[in-house]
Each structure stands twice: as C-alpha cells, then as structure tokens.
Image (spheres, rainbow, N blue to C red):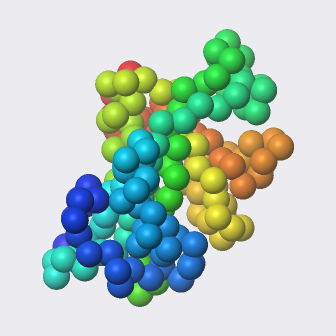
Amino acid sequence: MNLRIERLDRQSVAGFSCGNEQLDEWLIVHASTATGHGTRTYLLVDPSDRVVGYFAIAPHLLSRGAAPRQLARGAPSNIPAVLLAKLALDSTLHGQGIGAELLVNALTTIVSAARDVGGRLVIVDAIDDGARAFYERHDFHPLPRAPHRLVMRMSTAARALGIDWP
C-alpha cells in the first residue's frame, strides 16, 4: 500500500475511524485548534487522499521527580521531552504492521526535530492496556507511578532509527 505522511492542513478528516471514539473525535473536532496551541498533527494518507491514520506531537516537560531514577540522575528539575500526544490507525488497517510503521514515522519526526531544538525523552500516554502493550513492544517503558505514561530516551529512538544523535 502506497501511504504518505502529510502535516494537517485543510484535508478532510471527517470519515476517520480507528475504533476509539476519543481518538476519532480528537482528530475530527480538536486537531485543527490544537495546532494553534503548539501541537503538530501529521496524517497518514492513502493514494485516494483518504486519511487512514495520524499522530500528534507537542513539546513537553517531565518533572525529574516523576522520572525513573536512571533517567532522573543528572537531569534538570524539568526534563525536556516531546509528547507523542496521539497515534491512531484506521480500524480497517489494524493487524497489518502499519501502526508500527506510523510509530516509526512519528519517532523519526520527533528525533529529527529534537536534533535541532533539544529534548531528552519521548513520552506517550497510552489510552488503554492494548496501547500500553503496543508501546512496550517498541521499547517504551512505563513510569513507576503512572503505568500508562511511558517513556523512551531520545537517544534510544535515534539509535533504533539509524539517526545520528545528537
């Protein structure tokens, strides 16, 4: 399947359905507004220009007190990060490995930006246990006091993607 990534602009997202109403509603109702507040949304688009997935990212800070000891050691009181705020795939494409490819695209975008502006971590808030398991399979680790908030070192993501860091 020939899919491409586009930044959210004026594309029609009205028919998007990933199987989770919160994620569908966020894209359809809130994504455009979120762009004005610092979030960037990227769409996965098929050859017929249908939106079949998306991810959203935003700058973020993680309190050193919330971080695992090995991440907190030597870190500032607020650790610079990028939040992978949303990631969703059309329900017709589940189970084909396309979600993992979408995550790779998201991490590539995040690491590329972080090489220019900085950042030590990638953070994601898993929407449910299935999402948590998905992120854990891709080297994210849950925070000790927030098991659905997961982190990955930016350097780990860069290494996995074959991107020089920093």
Q: Is residue 129 above or below residue 18?
A: above
Task: Work out whether residue 117 can be spotted.
Answer: yes
Q: Residue at x 41, y 87 (%)?
A: 92
The outermost residue toward the right is: 145
Q: To which quarter of the image does residue 6 belong?
A: bottom left
Q: Residue at x 64, y 15 (%)?
A: 76
Q: Is residue 97 above or below residue 68?
A: below
Q: Is residue 109 left or right of residue 85?
A: left
Task: Work out whether residue 93 can be spotted.
Answer: no
Question: Whole-percent x and y of residue 125?
Answer: 63, 53
Q: Nearer the viewer, residue 97 or 80?
A: 80
Quadrant (top left/top right/bottom left/bottom right) for the N terminus: bottom left
Question: Whole-percent x and y of residue 57?
Answer: 44, 48
Quadrant (top left/top right/bottom left/bottom right) for the C terminus: top left
Q: Residue at x 62, y 42 (%)?
A: 151
Q: To which quarter of the image does residue 77 belong?
A: top right
Q: Is residue 166 left or right of residue 86?
A: left
Q: Nearer the viewer, residue 13 or 139?
A: 13
Q: To which quarter of the image does residue 41 belong?
A: bottom left
Task: Tally the marks.
Answer: 0
Question: Whole-percent x and y of residue 98?
Answer: 39, 70
Q: Residue at x 48, y 36 (%)?
A: 59
Q: Is residue 74 above or below residue 133?
A: above
Q: Is residue 5 above or below residue 89?
A: above
Q: Is residue 100 left or right of residue 44?
A: right
